[in-house]
Amino acid sequence: MQKFEAVATPMKTSIESIQVVNQTDLNDFSTLREIRPSQVFSDEGLEYLDELSKLLIKDSSIREYPDVATFAFYCRKANLINLRNAFLKEGRIKVGRGIIFHIAPSNVPVNFAYSLVAGLLSGNANVIKIPSGNFQQVDMIVSAINKLSMVQKYRLISEKIILVKYSRENVSATKLLSGICNVRVIWGGDKSIESVRRNELQPRAFDITFSDRYSLCVINADNYIHEKSPRKIADGFYNDTYLFDQNACTSPHLIVWLGLKENVKKSQSIFWGSLHELVKEKYMLDPIQAIDKVSQFYNQSLSGIGASKVEAEDNLIWRIQPDKIDSSIEEFRCIGGYFNEYHASSISEIANLANTKYQTMSYYGLSRTELESFVFLDNPMGIDRIVPIGKTMDFSLIWDGYDLISSLSREVEII
């Protein structure tokens, strides 16, 4: 197989440059049309992803990148078989739609790999625009994909994977790839989605979009006060937030406390104290982030909801306590450890502010019964995921309310 640094296309669309970063025997993108869709959760796809998992686990630097380790663990064959059994338990006949064009976010390195997994498991060929920035996590995964492309056993699966890089300004590239795909998956902000949607799709093609979302964390202080391992909870919260500088749509920006006032006060001291120790050990705050937090606090203070800042010994954690709370709170977020904090009388208060912009709610000290009651009785307009603290970044084939396998495949009816 030949490794391409750039691809020329016979199509009329002018391309500045599309860099193909994995090895492929494709001469141009039109060859993708010849690849037939396969059944969902094919044995070949599961074996390929399991081998990808093994290669990543063998990488000596994986300990430095917990997000890559989590991805490798997700791709284990045992996990994928469990997912297949759950999906196909009704005996449905599902096959891929054809070509999926994935546009990955620029600020979450491993997201492109999960999007690829969804595309492969749903039986499709995949063109993935990976982050253009320099991320070691991306390099590790691309290196493993390159190694597998050289193995004859995985040749057919490797042909279904094309990883590309090009600048955001290269609108011609997006136009070309949009024109040949059957589904376009856009991970990014609202403005990015609007820009990509200017490029027309085929008549039967459609978009799956993952736009700007807002996430929060709910802690029941009446239970947290008895937690014997607060450091473990802090570690999980750190991974949810500081690991990606609160850039991920799953990262909490609002912390809602439940419980008796005295328990909330004690729990806050323990929780934030444990987190501060961890942040001091592991996190480096950029000067520009410190300035951004000051600027955002002033904006919030002058807004209709108002705010006060809890005094702290340094700039690593900013705890902002708004005078009141409503759906506009999602406008006041910042990276680098900026958290709005609120003591609610009950979880029902969250339903009043959780509009469709709300994605993930992480929690501590709430039972499944309480969470189900919140969803079915309080009826929040938003919140698509409810997960324990430390699990917000864990990928699921149900994302933002989409069943990805169902969305990226088509069902064949046989009567």
Image (cartoon, rainbow, N blue to C red):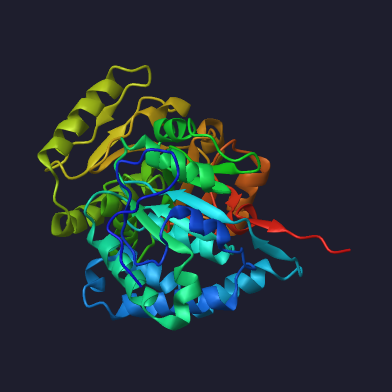
Quarter of image, res 348: top right
Viewer-side residue, 331 vs 406: 406
Which residue appears at 22% of the width and 78% of the height? Answer: 60
Residue at 53% across, 33% down: 355
**Vertically, is 47 above or below 317?**
below
Quadrant (top left, top right, bottom left, bottom right) of the C terminus: bottom right
Specify whether 349 is left or right of 228. right
Q: Is residue 306 above or below residue 373?
A: above
Q: Where does residue 98 sit, x and y in percent of width and height?
A: 59, 56
Q: Position of residue 146 (x, y in %)?
A: 33, 71
Q: Can residue 133 be seen in this view?
A: yes
- Does residue 203 lie above or below 102 as drawn? above
Residue drawn 47% across the image and 47% down it? 360
Number of numbered discs: 0
Measuring from the top left, give residue 93's x and y in whole percent: 74, 66
| Residue at 35%, 50% in the rendered image | 8
Does residue 396 appear in the picture of this structure? no
- The quadrant of the image that shows the N terminus is bottom left
The percent coordinates of residue 410 (x first, y second) are 69, 56
